[in-house]
Amino acid sequence: MSASKLGNSDIFQPVTVQAQTTRLNLPASAVRIHKSGIEFRTATAIPAWTEMTIDLQTPLYPKKFHCTGVVVACSGNRHAGYRVSMVFTGLSSKAQARLSSLAYSSLA
């Protein structure tokens, strides 16, 4: 996975991550976009292999961008928080192109 670093700039609107029983609204500072997935920090542990849906909205793509993915790692603890890594599944070629442009964006 190739990572892009997000500074203090708020290029993303709040990100919504949702599973069947979990819904998280994350600030832009808690999210890192990769070309094949996303990494985010949260106070709640999410078990590996949990399927989740993500809504992203950025100045580059003001319309909400929906992605489905699977949690592949969740590390941390309840005191310091958890770092969750997700890999997106079943992306169309258009969605993959958008995600790649976000991962390598000069805004990131």
Image (cartoon, helix red, strand yellow):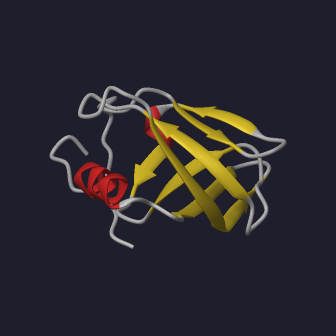
Q: In this view, does 19 lie above or below 15?
A: below
Nearest the camera: 95 or 7? 95
Which residue reaches farthest left?
106
- The answer to whether residue 3 of the structure is visible from this angle is yes
Nearest the camera: 15 or 32? 15
**Among the 4 quarters of the image, the one containing residue 3:** bottom left
Q: In this view, does 108 lie above or below 9?
A: below
Residue, x 51% and y 64% (percent of image)? 90
Q: Is residue 11 above or below residue 36?
A: above
Residue 2 placement, left or right of 20: left
Q: In which quarter of the image is the N terminus?
A: bottom left
Q: Point out residue 4 in the picture as x, y percentages from the top left corner.
A: 30, 57
Residue, x 59% and y 48% (percent of image)? 41
Tally of numbered discs: 0
Q: Point out residue 32 in the picture as x, y percentages from the top left corner.
A: 42, 51
Nearest the camera: 43 or 100? 100
Residue, x 68% and y 65% (percent of image)? 75
Q: Quadrant of the C terminus?
A: top left
Residue 50 placement, left or right of 89: right
